[in-house]
Amino acid sequence: MNIILCDDHPLIRRSLRELLQEIRPDAALREATSAAELFQLQREQPAQMVVLDLSLPDRHGLECLSELRQRDPTLKVLILSMHNEERFALRALELGASGYLGKHRAPAEIAGALQRVLNGGRYIDPETAEALARRAFGGTKLPHEALSPREFSVLRELGRGRSPATIAEQLFLSAKTVSTYRSRVLNKLALKTNADLVRYCLSHALID
């Protein structure tokens, strides 16, 4: 069993390593601090499981999740994030995550989630389960939930007030491509300006 721990905080990686060494002492554990390092490790030796943070320095975790699952639909991915579960959990599960867990959870709960995913199951905490139930019984999707992972990343960066040139550099895209994504996002959200995008992100707690 090869497992990659992808988080830019060394204390988080250390804690995860200690938990996994207790749960699965025979596993080969590797660490990545960015999306670029994660995909490099995955190219060198494919992992069977990835523990993935959403707030990486170079790409959003949801975008990484989508690409990882496209490359290997059997890959187990447990999202471990500082973000409120309901804010991103449903989207992560739709993209193929095996589970979603907040970093504020107790070590015993994190260990239980890791164990369940390692055994081929899924982990959904009570808050996420309640949100799923609301969706199943007549809840409606928010407009941003219809965006692609890349569109969602561009939306969040625009919401932070970053320019297309800056976003292009950060996401390894051309400025023209970013402008295309911006147009798509504005159309899907029925908005007109960057100021509208900022207000939308703030009102839906999509940016920190």
Image (cartoon, helix red, strand yellow):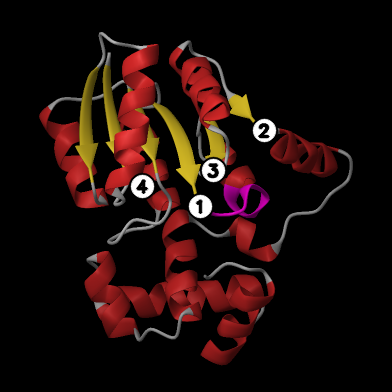
Asked if one can make out residue 199 in the rendered structure from this viewpoint, the answer is yes
Where is residue 139 shown, x and y percent of the image?
A: 84, 49
Where is residue 69 shown, x and y percent of the image?
A: 39, 34
Which residue, given by chain and number where applicable, does mark 2 sit on? 125
Residue type at tag 1:
Met
Q: Secondary structure at mark 3?
A: helix
Query: How busy is the neighbourhood of tag 2: few (under 14 within 10 Å), some, or many (20 plus)?
Result: some
Marking on residue 92: 3
Residue extent of the magenta highlight = 82-88
Which residue, given by chain and number where applicable, does mark 4 sit on? 64
**Residue with the most extreme left position:** 44
Q: Nearer the viewer, residue 9 or 166?
A: 9
Q: Secondary structure at mark 2?
A: loop
Which residue, given by chain and number where applicable, does mark 1 sit on? 82
Picture residue at 30% right of the left edge, 28% below the top = 17
Mark whose residue sits in front, 4 or 1: 1
